[in-house]
Image (cartoon, rainbow, N blue to C red):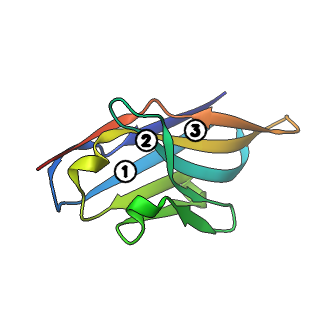
Amino acid sequence: QVQLVESGGGLVQAGGSLRLSCAASGSIFRIGNMGWYRRAPGKQRELVAGITSGDITNYVDSVKGRFTISRDNAKNTVYLQMNSLKPEDTAVYYCKAEVLISGEYRFLEVWGQGTLVTVSS
């Protein structure tokens, strides 16, 4: 099957930066849309940033100008560069990918296990 493995989370002071990575592995024929979501304590999960297979990006308003999503199709990896971090960015960050598995005929939604980002004030 397919797995998504995130890395890059951690503790950072307000104003600092982190770069999250999410690598997909397994019987992958093609990857479509990819995205980063987050769930803050006591809040619902929200889409932070998305990127299509054609590199069209979208962001939630609260991160525009601070976060950048990108992807490396050769490595089946999506990144989230987070700058000017704020305490309210503290959350578990999850990546999601729409994956066409070899031998299958439709894209499946695959989620990573999550990585914790903590921003101290």
Q: Nearer the viewer, mark 3 or mark 1?
A: 1
Q: Is residue 27 left or right of residue 42?
A: right
Residue situated in front as seen by the camera: 47 or 53: 47
Residue designated by label 2? 38
Q: Amino acid at mark 1?
A: Leu
* Nearer to the camera, 87 or 111: 87
Label 3's element?
strand
**Looking at the rendered structure, which numbered label has been put on residue 98?**
none
Does the residue at mark 1 contact the one at mark 2 (Cβ under 8 Å)?
no
Q: Position of residue 34 (x, y in %)?
A: 60, 51
Which residue is painted at 42% across and 67% down in the image? 64
The mark nearer the N terminus, 3 or 2, is 3
- Marks 3 and 2, how far apart in space? 22 Å
Comparing marks 3 and 2, which lies closer to the viewer?
A: 2
Picture coordinates of residue 39, whole percent (x, y)? 41, 36
Task: Mark 1 or mark 2: name the one nearer the start of the chain.
Answer: 1
The residue that mark 1 highlights is 20
Assess whether mark 2 and mark 3 are in contact (beta carbons under 8 angstroms).
no
Task: Say which residue appears at 48% left-offset and 62% top-offset.
Answer: 69
Left or right, residue 65 beside residue 1: left
On the rendered structure, is 94 left or right of 66? right
Residue 25 circle label: 3
Residue 78, image x, y percentages: 51, 54
